[in-house]
Image (cartoon, coloured by chain):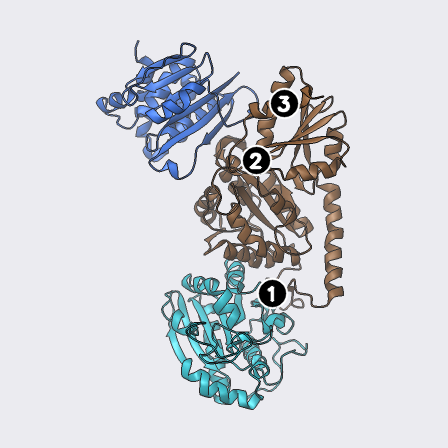
Amino acid sequence: MERMLMKGNEALAEAAIRAGCKCFFGYPITPQTEISAYMAKRMPKVGGVFLQAESEVAAINMVYGCASSGIRCMTSSSSPGISLKGEGVSYIAGSDLPAVIVNVMRGGPGLGGIQPSQSDYWQATRAMGHGDFQIIVYAPSSVQEMADYMGKAFNMADRFRMPALILADGLLGQMMEPVVFEDKEIKMSDASDKPWAASGHGNRRPHNIINSLYLQADELETYNVERFKRYEKVKEELPELESYLCEDAEIVVAAYGSVARLAKAAVEQARAEGIKAGLARPITLYPYPERELRAACKTAKKVLVTEMSMGQMVDDVRLALECRLPVEFFGRTGGVVPKPSEILAKVKVMKGAE
Amino acid sequence: MTEEIILAGFGGQGILFAGKMLAYFGLMDGREVSWLPSYGPEMRGGTANCSVCISDGTICSPLVTEPDILIAMNKPSYDKFINTVKPGGIAIIDSFLIDDRCERDDIKCFYIPATPMAVENGITGMANIILVGKLVKETGIASAEAIRQALEKIIPPKKANLIESNLKAIEMGQSYGQ
Amino acid sequence: MPDFNKPHALTDVPMHYCPGCTHGIVHRLVAEVIDEMGIEGDTIGICPVGCSVMAYDYFNCDMIEAAHGRAPAVATGVKRANPDKFVFTYQGDGDLAAIGTAETVHAATRGENITAIFINNTTYGMTGGQMAPTTLPGQVTQTTPYGRSTDVEGFPVRVCEILSQVSGVALAERVTVTDPANVRKAKAAIRKGFEFQKNKQGFSLIEVLSTCPTNWGKSPVESLGWLKENMIPYYPLGVYKEGAIR
């Protein structure tokens, strides 16, 4: 298995193809455009479909149509474009369809900037669209993980029949790192394992209907309750958190995605300076790894949450810890990447204030 | 052991490519590497820079803020980054494009007129690679074998003739000032 | 001999359409074409948001319910993944020519091998009779209580005329279903659209001038008369573009 040097965006795209993603529908936006470019080049060669849509709205609705027919498909965008996809994600969830959406985050709100950011955490975990639904959100932290969690996202989306989102950022999308792919023949997905799909009944079964409209309130309630019950299973099985040097840590730094790498550097430096620091890195952002975080904070006296935002995941940390530990926040926003030295400085202040 | 490198200059000077080449050197030597470009509208004709890390262990931050090594190919980049170089670090400077001479005595600076050297030797546009050659010479960051393997990897077979000219540029950088 | 039995491509679910509404006729025509071509098992229909939102219950082929205006994008997703299947959208004027204009025009420019059935009845029926993009000048609706003023609300959209300029379009034809002769022409147009699709020859759209007696405040018969007198002059019937693009 060859170590290849690839951009995060490209690794994502290649991993999707290897996961049998047959169709990609996209729209150009910095800093995720390499995904489209890679798909445009590669899809026709492996019997897949790349289509540049007229808008983000159209792209997500193409995904909705393609997923309705039981075919693995995806779309990707960056923050402002993800807002436009919200409608479609809600319909996908409401119709119990598997699909993968990638958000390579940039600074917001509005047109914002094009530098890396994590300011769509709330949107990703709470408000990807209107209505009562939950999705699966993965936050990779390296180019290798961009690839690994892409395959996982497709598998989990299929298994639980719900959208899965990869929440990355401009830093992860643009950086190159070595990545290894499993040697496996590429096989495009078909609808054979999806008896619910609207792919033509072939005069062999009653017609299938893909729909999220239920005009009877009690009927809609039944579907929503069933969906949330299904999500309970997701909550049991999917939460993932990497814990690093947390066994005896007095100060646990919680961070996800690219920022977790910067936090790791800060934690290592703190250890070198004699401060018992550790890193807790949620890999699933939804469902949130609550148990895993509590375990990582077992010996902690204080928790520092660091993000490239004004503080969004910090809410979930407080909820998971049930306010039993003081939780502080350090973040940079607007596309400014925090320096490990800044995080370290905050850790030192917290240590000193004990 | 981790080397943190910043390469900076104008868009079109091959800054990102030179960084990629360094990352491939590390890859071929079986080390951990990362390459992170500045991206955005400034890439088209404005300033361009990238961070490269080459390490024997895990790379935490791919974003380099205090480099061990700086390659500077224009004045704005030199001004922006020269004071961020770690004490004990080195700076490799295209002295044709940058008139300044660094006053810091805690870093080692190498001045190479790489741009005219490239033109005079029939490899116009490879000033970036000449500077990479100097970096290799001063740091021993890559083995000769890794360099050749990396070039074979990043230069598409259609342009195989460029492998030799890149090797020539690296050699010129390595032997400059000897 | 006309066949008065229910086409197989229609289910037994009773339709919810108002008395005199022409949706039922158009549903039947689409279903007859599906039956005659023997393609029910290979057809996927996309419903809009609007009065025909529940068409998924009426057609016997596999059906997908799309968000408002997005049916052509949804159809594109299905068709690109399943190029040998038949895919049609069934959309109203608000869906196709207002909120979904971009999706319509771009599916057409791409020459997607899909067939759009476009019901133009100059009103938003399901929400209770508001102004549509196709509401005629002077026409009174809930949101144009003094009549549509072209100074304020602008001009009605002529979809077939627009699509006649679009290179990806194999068929843009306007028909109506006011009488048996026109019903037969409408069916022939729908059949043509599906044939273009079968041969992968480009995007087809059949605009059907339709009635909305309930929101127009007219009897079914009066509505047919109003359509002929007012709509056809503004939206002349006929073929606006026909010919394989590939």
Question: Is A102 left, or right, of B139 in this rendering?
Answer: right
What chain does mark 2 sit on? A
How much space separates mark 1 and mark 2, taking CA atoms? 38 Å
What chain does mark 1 sit on? C
Q: Position of residue B138 (x, y in %)?
A: 39, 13
Mark 3 or mark 2, which is nearer the start of the sequence? Answer: 3
Mark 3, residue position: A267
Above or below: residue C85 compared with residue C140: above
**Viewer-nearest of discs 1 and 2:** 2
Q: Colour of chain B?
A: blue
Q: Position of residue B74 (x, y in %)?
A: 33, 25
Please determine if labels 1 and 2 lie on a single subunit: no
Identify the disc placed on residue A308: 2
Identify the disc placed on residue C65: 1
Q: Colour of chain C?
A: cyan
Q: Colour of chain A?
A: brown
